[in-house]
Image: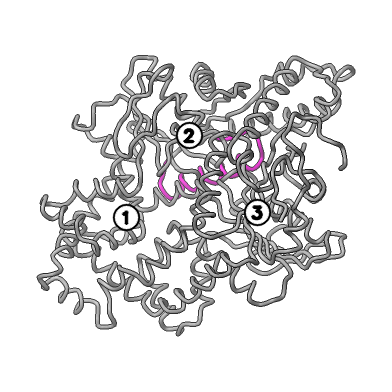
Amino acid sequence: MTGKGGTGKSTVAAALALKHAREGKRVLLIELGNRSFFSTSNGSSLANAASPSEQVRLPDALAGIDLLQLAPLASLKQFVKRFALFETAANMLLDSKPARGVLNTLPGLKELAIIGKLTHYLEPSDEQGGYDLVVVDSFSTGHFLALLRAPLALAESIRSGPMGRQCRKMIKQLQDPTLCRFVIVTLPEELPLAESLELSATLADEFAIEVDYLCNKTLLEQDLIAVDAEAADQGFVAYLEDWRQRQTKVLAVLTQQQRSVQALPYCFEVDLNQQIETLADALT
Amino acid sequence: MTTARQLPSSAIEPNMIDRILDDYRVVVCGGTGGVGKTTVSAALGIAAAQRGKRVLVLTVDPARRLANALGLDQIEHQLVEIPTGHSGQLWISMLQPDRIFEHFIDQVDVAAVDKQRLKQNRLFQQLSTTLSGSQEFTSLMWLQQLAASGDYDLIILDTPPSDHAIDFIHAPERIAALFEGTVAKFFAGKVTRLGILNKLLVGSTQLWLKALSKLTGAEFIDAVSDFVTSIDPFSQVISARSRAAERLLKSDQTAFFLVASPDPAKLEQGQAFHDELQHSGYRLQAVVINRAYPCWFQQSVDSGIGSTKLQGHMQRYYQSRIDQVRASPLVSDNAIPVMELPELVGPLAGPDELQQLANYLLAEPAISAGTDE
């Protein structure tokens, strides 16, 4: 899952995970970055600060979802351990201060490590916990592209050696529509729409990846037209009319993309837990 | 804009935005992606022009949003003067994110042959545009250069989009480290790259390099080695410029604004941003809660109308969000003025909407705090 910042990507990702967990699937929700969406005060009832690189179970209403917060640096360490040919080589890299400095600053390596971890879940082996579905609450647009470009760039510069081989394999896995689905979360607003279309064009051009769309925070057509313009607050009427026009246009444009598009309802609940449940109910 | 707010609120304090625009030479607008930093930066620019300033707004704007809002097709690198109808003057300049780092390399004072070599390096070509932190780094370099020119009373920097506001502060360090730090020291030197690499690989103290080579393959090490050798000539100018930029950001001429959306996770990140800025010696001077409530909200609360069930739902929803904002530590615990801006009707902020926001910024009372120095 990706999308412009502020579109509700994390909430929608959690809702998608919940929907599948309710269906009895083993679901892992992965958050990228150093801070968990669920460790903020509004979500503290959901999970106590997920410790980096360790799965935690989400309690209560979100039971059935395992949560993994994937911090870039921790991913890099795992990546080194996984691909170093000898245990001693890995330890040498991780224990040496200059080596850590090099690993830390080399462009693209952390991104590569994250993609490496994510594609590891696509391996046929069961060592990752046997999840039926892994939902990745990924970075927003710009950083997301940087993430995907890392293995592509390295595969192009390195034709031989284990690193180049790994990169080419990762790209193949990401491009396989039977393994991976890419979803852009957007809003019924002009700017998020423009950014979504630009992103999907780039993904198609550079990676041959097709995306689906979830349009978050939409209002029902019946609500949008049910206002009696005579009696109502004129400011509100103008606001809804503007909303209706935007929403109609955005959904029409998304539908033209010939991919799966679903409109998700605006949740008038402040509680995060409830929002996630409402969205999970709505997802098809 | 003198309507007294009837929302339940903490003690109303005077708005300090006008004073900040008058007293500082640089305003940095930070915040996570999607909160409307660019819009707020542009509105601040108009507000400053309204106060008679010669003001420049710098932005990295992949969506070309600012250009659209101001009725322009494109603004690329060069400065464009925007007519505002006010006594001051407003310029806008927009960096293109895809060429941003190359643009910086073109500008620095380093021999052309060295620039050519770096630009031809495969890793640089493929990674410079996506290198995380390169937008932050470049916009900071650019800010420092323009501030040193003395051509403007005030420069407003709209920070590049990021997942966390604080990324802006740390990104330049990371880039500077790449150019001057560990990597170069351990790979490079000015001898031929294969020579030094072989020496390193056979040296018994450099076992870790052998391990790295095993991990990545010799070809990768070779590419990296060429990369770090190519960036070596840039290290001095980059570290000098980084230090100058850091001094500028920490000086008493620079004020930070945090732009946030009214949702709890963003407010919490805002508090972390506040703490980190304070801890590192920067000055956070104002918080702007953008799109805090829809344009019809205040009037409907004042008059007690809720003409439909939907409006009633929305009214309660926005009211509880406002309550949440006001109860958050960011608003209630810190001695910083907090402004709430309404969400205006209209898909894209145009010049009129930006002027309207500028009026709010100058005239609305802050909802909390504000030190009285």
Check the picture and name the quadrant holding the C terminus of chain B. bottom right
Identify which amino acid the numbered label 1 is placed on. Leu
Asked if the magenta segment contains residue A156, the reply would be: no
Q: Residue at x 48, y 53 (%)?
A: B167
Identify which amino acid the numbered label 2 is placed on. Thr
Residue position for label 3: B285
Do residues under tags 3 and 2 come within 8 Å of each other at their CB atoms? Answer: no
Residue B181, numbered circle:
none
Q: Quadrant of residue A195?
A: top right
The residue nearer to you, when weighing B248 against A284, is B248
- Decide: is B164 above or below B139: above
Do residues under tags 1 and 3 come within 8 Å of each other at their CB atoms? Answer: no
Chain designation of label 3? B
Check the picture and name the quadrant holding the N terminus of chain B. top right
Tell me the element at label 1.
Answer: helix
Most common SS among magenta residues: helix
Foreground disc of the pair 3, 2: 3
Tell me the element at label 2.
Answer: loop
Q: Horizontal and vertical percent for residue B354? A: 77, 49
Q: Horizontal and vertical percent for residue B61? A: 61, 55
Residue position for label 1: A109
Chain designation of label 1? A
Q: Horizontal and vertical percent for residue A246? A: 70, 33
Marks 3 and 2 sit apart, C-alpha to C-alpha, by 24 Å
Foreground disc of the pair 1, 3: 3
Residue A40, numbered circle:
2
Q: On the rendered structure, is A216 left or right of B206?
A: right
Identify which amino acid the numbered label 3 is placed on. Gln
Asked if the magenta segment contains residue A200, the reply would be: yes
What span is colored magenta in the figure? A186-209
- Decide: is A225 above or below A243: above
Do residues under tags 1 and 2 come within 8 Å of each other at their CB atoms? Answer: no
